[in-house]
Amino acid sequence: MKNNLFRRALIPALFCGCLVLMGACNHNNPAPPINASTSTIGYVLANGANTTIFNSAVLKAGLDSVFTSPAIFTLFVPNNDACVQSGFTQDSVNNFTPAQARDWVLYQTYAGVALTLESFIGKTEEKLIMANGDSIFVTGDSNRTFVNGFQTYNSEITASNGQMLALQNALRPPTQNLYQIVSSDTSYSFLNQAILLATPVPDSLNQLLSTGGPFTFLAPDNDAFRNLGYSTPASLSAVSPDSLRTLVLVGLIPQRLFSYDIADSSTYQTVNDSTLIFYFRGIANAVQIVGDTTTSNVISIGYMGTNGVLFKMDSVIGR
């Protein structure tokens, strides 16, 4: 567990070690001093060489006065590299409207409490309602903290009006439910057709994936269906609706899971009572039905929807 000595060591690390928030230290351009009793979150953001992109969004949103006020916040801060890696370049932030900038910044702002990395030790998908009204999910142990599936840096700054935790990825509030993700992504055209043709009893699968959950959806892509011999989505009309319902539900786990939640050889029950087992095999994670010999591999992981998380799979589970 982090102790006080470790936490005190984090502050100088931010300036001259990992340089997560404030930027590089050098004799010609030293980082401004931070006093936890007097330096506000707004001051740290404005003076950080590595927080210029995020701070520009703060300024556009008109939140600079808020972050220099006495109100208490926990701010999950993506540094410049994290912003760019997540698609939020300086140009894209410059093109934000004030409302867009405000929503983005407030999704990374927890109001009223100063939370440290230590606050999340032992937490599993701790739900926090952020200042824009959307939720994030935080999991932590003594070495790592994850937010919405992304790992934070082990770095934090205490300011006079709260705490700043450094993100490796900028957070993006989910805007689509699981069915909307599938139906709007052309790499899932076959899966979307299977969902629409599946037996609609006791409810249609598009309705379940739109309003139910939270779920973890192991979603086979188009190539997974082509490998089974289906040439077009329309060719799935030859499959029985009951079989299509089973095909979809065998990959639907009734809980929200990110990749770090899943241990090697762990098992999970699906919505149709199948038991899935996960294996870690080098860089590819694999899953299969317990007792079955066929294996599906995870192509990409952790795409977050409003009602769960989607994993893209290279084959249909159990086929």
Image (cartoon, rainbow, N blue to C red):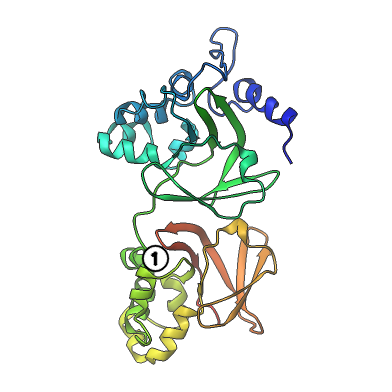
In the picture of the structure, the residue carrying the numbered disc 1 is: 178
Q: Residues within 10 Å of mark 1 (few under 14, many from 20)?
A: many
Residue 276 visible in the shown view: yes
Determine the residue positioned at 47% across, 79% down: 249
Q: Is residue 156 left or right of residue 57?
A: right
Q: Position of residue 81 (x, y in %)?
A: 49, 33
Against 9, is 170 above or below?
below
Q: Position of residue 164 (x, y in %)?
A: 53, 31
Q: Position of residue 269 (x, y in %)?
A: 58, 76
Q: Identify the element where label 1 is drawn.
A: helix
Instruction: Report how many numbered discs are placed on residues in the image.
Output: 1
Q: As rendered, which of 67 and 100 lies closer to the eye?
A: 67
Against 314, is 3 above or below?
above
Against 288, is 67 above or below?
above
Residue sitting farthest toward the top: 28
Q: Is residue 228 left or right of residue 241?
A: right
Location of residue 276 (image quadrant): bottom right
Q: As rendered, which of 155 and 52 lies closer to the eye?
A: 155
Determine the residue positioned at 45% across, 57% down: 304
Q: Position of residue 206 (x, y in %)?
A: 34, 75
Q: As rendered, which of 45 and 29 lies closer to the eye?
A: 45
Location of residue 26 (image quadrant): top right
- The disc labelled 1 sits on which kind of residue? Leu
Residue 48 visible in the shown view: no
Location of residue 205 (image quadrant): bottom left
Quadrant holding the N terminus: top right
Against 141, is 205 above or below?
below
Q: As rendered, which of 244 and 212 lies closer to the eye?
A: 212
